[in-house]
Amino acid sequence: MDKSHLHGLSKYFILIFFSLSLVFASANKPNSTVQINSNSILVALLDSSYTELAELIEKALLLQYLEDMVGKHNLTIFAPKNEALEQDLNPEFKRFLLEPRNLKSLQSLILHHIVPSRVNLTKQAEFTRKRALSNHHLRLSLNNKRMVVEESVEVIDKNSIIKPDGLIHGIDRVLVPHSVLEEFNNRRELRSISAVLPTSAPTMDSRKRTQHRGAKMGPAGAPPAVPIFDALAPGPSLAPAPAPGPGGPHHHFDGASQVKDFITTLTHYGGYNELADILVNLTSLATEMGRLVSEGYVITVLAPNDEAMGRLTADQLSEPGAPEQIMYYHIIPEYQTEESMYSSVRRFGKVNYETLRLPHKVMAEEADGSVRFGQGEGSAYLFDPDIYTDGRISVQGIDGVLFPSEEVKAPPAVKKVVAKQRRGKLMEVGCTLAAALGHDSYFAYCSR
């Protein structure tokens, strides 16, 4: 059986599971009065030629919302054909929509295809405007007796599905709201901009380990002159205030916003709330990472999931500064993605990455078709790859908490030797005399 057949079967079983969950989920909700039956427009969408749209609805977490809408309104769904979503859509734009941090953009795009009323143009009304669930208006018109949406997207299968709670019109292309297209362009432009250091940033002479200001700035996009280890805060309890926001003639990056963006992505992704809590509430690491990114540094975060964080013991977290030291060991001062790390370990076998916890490094190797960090029982696999990648911050989910293998060994225990008490010559004479005279107390003492 080839891969295409396997892919088709897997999609088939996914859709069956999705359909059953749609029918029975509302019946199990204690506060819901809406009963989704097999004759619903949402169920019919699954058993149609628009399965790609149905899968996107599930990925966008909109099923619950649409269930509630069906109970209040009839829905008209302008459903793009599967080819429009699989082949005709720009691959870069599709990757943008499927990234967890862009969930709102995906939701806006899907809701832009759904109108909370029945829409069916006739000769008497050849033009109308309808507000979609995305809060954007759709311009509908007739062109040679064919319905057209937004003046360019043609309805190729009018009234393809009609149900008591709505209907579906098949369209030949995807409707993209202006707000989603603008967000996509902003993301793409952000990746192409080069970081510029703020004026008078400190530089470091690595031989003398002394800082001096006013050094000549490098070209735009050049890496910072100061090693990232010297740019770190003095210590966990002495972390500085947030760096000033972008300004001046160079308009350098707002690292605080980028760090906030990736932490928000972690919480939306699910399963990384403990890590987000440590970064924001228990330490000042979010502030520190934002300052580093503002100054042009790049970082890769190996993010342990909630299950892994739950295995930490009280002893591991009780020492002052322990959360910071644990997290420093999970931050690599390089920009790495799943592809770059996997390519490295496949080529070189084992790769040691620097971490912000000097002088410790984290070792990576290929294992079971993935990347494994650490060794033995303390190892962790790359579990959720590329949760967040924007060219400066990369977040890679792992299924364990890593600790340095170079542990400080305790000095060997020194055996305490108790010197045996020596008896003097006079004591020996006294004991001999006590034995001869039969004094019990002296005899007991001398027999020790």
Image (cartoon, grey):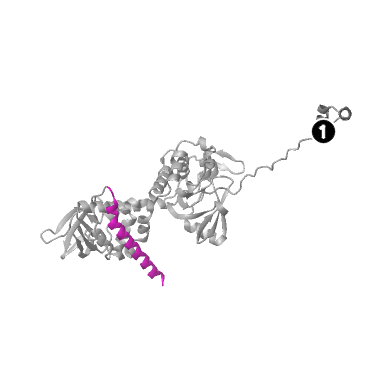
Q: Quadrant of residue 49?
A: bottom left
Left or right, 377 with reference to 256: right
The answer to whether 313 is drawn above or below residue 425 in the figure is below
Q: Which residue carries the number 1 mark?
A: 447
Nearest the eye: 440 or 353 = 440
The answer to whether 210 is drawn above or below residue 345 in the figure is above
Outermost residue on the front side: it is 438
Left or right, 406 with reference to 89: right
Residue 263 shows in the view: yes
Q: Quadrant of residue 432?
A: top right
What percent of the width, then of the height, locates residue 318?
A: 53, 38
Q: What range is drawn magenta here?
A: 1-30
Q: How many marks?
A: 1
As helix, strand or loop, the secondary structure at mark 1 comes to loop
What percent of the width, then of the height, locates residue 109?
A: 29, 55
Tell me the quarter of the image containing the N terminus: bottom left
Q: Does the magenta-highlighted stretch encompass residue 68? A: no
What percent of the width, then of the height, locates residue 53?
A: 30, 60
Residue at the image point whose x is 57% and y is 60% from the top: 349
Tell me the quarter of the image containing the C terminus: top right
Nearest the eye: 327 or 47 = 47
